[in-house]
Image (tube, rainbow, N blue to C red):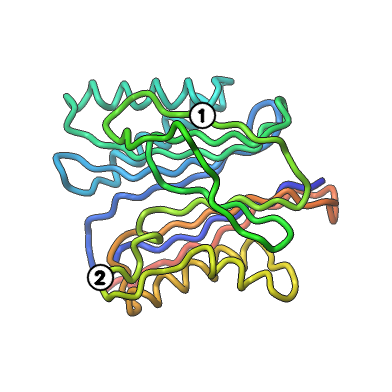
Amino acid sequence: MELQATISKVDRFSSAEHGDKVEIIERPRGGISIIMAEGKLGGRRSKAIAMKAVHSVLTLIASGLHDGAASRVVLSNIAEEHLGKAQISLSIISCDLESHSIVITKNNTMPVLTVFDGEAEFLRFDSATDTDHCCAPSVFQFEIEEGRNFILVSDGILQAGSQFEQPLDLRASVESLFEDDEPTVQEIADAILNQAIKQDLGRPRDDMTVTVLRISPSPSTSIRRECVFFPIPDSD
């Protein structure tokens, strides 16, 4: 089997206030974790808070701490440091080769979409509640299954088009990508992001992030690859 993962992201249009941060890390005992956070401080978007949360979680996972424990420590520390004025929406999706499972950790109600054999469905998290202000995230574990895709998006994706009465139908959009040949993880992420931007009439009203993780049936090579495309704005 082969683990494939990608991230596609765009910042809110024409605004210096951004709150999303996402990173990927190789786990110390095998596998990867993708950590996504949205931060607010005093009710305003705060990328600094999101970056602090993500980097702190990365450090703890790299040291061997489990995802749930790492999340609780970081959320608690940030709440204490900022006297409860900082809000963090934190999501982690991991392929943990030590436990041979997909682990999803979150303190929010953001849905996770799974795709298998071209059929998409939202995972049901029965115990998930809106706990953005809470330091006790929920942890969910799934068996690693060949050919299954997991898609995690930020609220900027889910709310795309809502201001213009043309909300994004995420499930239908994803299933349409699988109608012919199976798309690559990068094609999935880019297609979702581009459709969300289109629903917002080309001007994203919020930061938009899409992460895709797939368990491919067979590896194409033993080589590990990472690739980053990061636009550099023109300096005026």
**Residue 111 x, y percent position in the rendering:** 46, 48
**Residue 180 x, y percent position in the rendering:** 73, 76
Q: Tell me the quarter of the picture where residue 118 sits.
A: bottom right
Secondary structure of the residue carrying tag 1 is: strand
| Frontmost residue, 88 versus 167 | 167
State whether residue 204 is above or below residue 132: below
Assess disc 2: are there few (<14), some (14-19) or many (≥20) residues with their C-alpha within 10 Å of its C-alpha: few
Report the side of 210 relative to 213 (left or right).
left
Say which amino acid is labelled 2: Gln
Report the side of 59 relative to 51 (left or right).
right
The dot on residue 147 is none
Secondary structure of the residue carrying tag 2 is: helix
State whether residue 234 is above or below residue 206: below
Residue placed at 46% from the left, 73% from the top?
195
Residue placed at 72% from the left, 25% from the top?
98
Q: CA distance from mark 1 to mark 2?
A: 32 Å
**Residue 30 x, y percent position in the rendering:** 71, 31
Residue placed at 48% from the left, 20% from the top?
69
Residue placed at 49% from the left, 45% from the top?
23
State whether residue 13 is above or below residue 136: below
Assess disc 1: are there few (<14), some (14-19) or many (≥20) residues with their C-alpha within 10 Å of its C-alpha: many
Residue to which mark 1 is pinned: 139
Residue to which mark 2 is pinned: 163
Hey, which residue is sitting farthest left in the picture?
42
| Frontmost residue, 46 versus 185 | 185
Say which amino acid is labelled 1: Val
Earlier in the chain: of badge 1 and badge 2, it is 1
**Residue 200 x, y percent position in the rendering:** 33, 74
